[in-house]
Amino acid sequence: MQAVSFPDLTAVALLGAHCDDLAIGAGGALLTLCAGRPGLAVHALVLSGGGTERADEERAALAEFCAPAHVELTVLDLPDGRLPAHWDAVKDAVTALRGRIVPDLVFAPQPGDRHQDHRLLAEIAPTVFRDQPVLGYEILKWDGDLGQPTVYQPLTDEVAEAKADLLAKHYPSQHGRDWYTRDAFLGLARLRGVQQHTRYAEGFYVDKLALTLAEGAR
């Protein structure tokens, strides 16, 4: 499978509806992306969980998932499960982030997600970040909304296992969920790896990309 690289990344935007969405959906990609890039600017926006233990979990988790890059994290306190009723606040928050950063790459939920909070953010992200590639990550959960990704990030064994371990380490508030287990996260990563000829991978969804096919173009 032909790989597309981003050799000149300087800034990345991360969008999540809830604390742990980013780590579940793109934790392996973040570990891979940020390794060896201490100068990378990572700006993360999470819409709910502000002022709670979940915000503390998220701050510690992203610091480790994105090391050695520096993470600027904003966690708002919009109500979990009610984000569509706060459309204006969500759009304003994403627009404010776009005003602070011109990222080379954006991570957001994938548009086929059945959770209303994730789906809303997936719909808003490309309307704000119009000139950046938006990678839609998938979130393992009860709803059974896993589809067919269009883009894959291969993960080494070490990265896949580190992701599963960091999810367990940093989000103790989620340990009571029956799907929130190490074998579940590794199982999905193994499935996505099969689909792109590696042992482990993460899958992403991309609606629109611009090509540069001219000879000598970068």
Image (cartoon, rainbow, N blue to C red):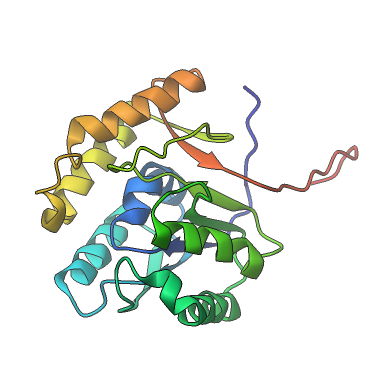
Rendering coords of residue 79 (x, y %):
30, 74
Image height check: is 217 above or below 81?
Answer: above
* Viewer-nearest residue: 134 or 59: 134
Q: Is residue 153 above or below residue 139?
A: above
Image vertical order of residue 197 relative to residue 81, above or below: above
Q: Count the marks.
A: 0
> Which residue sits at x=37%, y=46%?
139
Q: Quadrant of residue 132?
A: bottom right
In the image shown, does 119 or 20 lie closer to the viewer?
A: 119
From this viewpoint, which residue is outermost toward the front?
85
Question: In this view of the protein, can residue 127 be seen by the observer?
Answer: yes
Percent of width and height locating residue 121: 49, 63
- Identify the residue at image location x=87%, y=40%: 216
Q: Nearer the viewer, residue 146 or 196?
A: 146
Q: Residue at x 61, y 45 (%)?
A: 206
Q: Residue furthest right?
A: 214
* Residue 44 place in picture, x, y as percent: 42, 67
Compared with 184, 13 (above or below) is below
Q: Is residue 40 visible?
A: no
Q: Looking at the picture, how far across and down is residue 75, in whole percent?
A: 33, 75
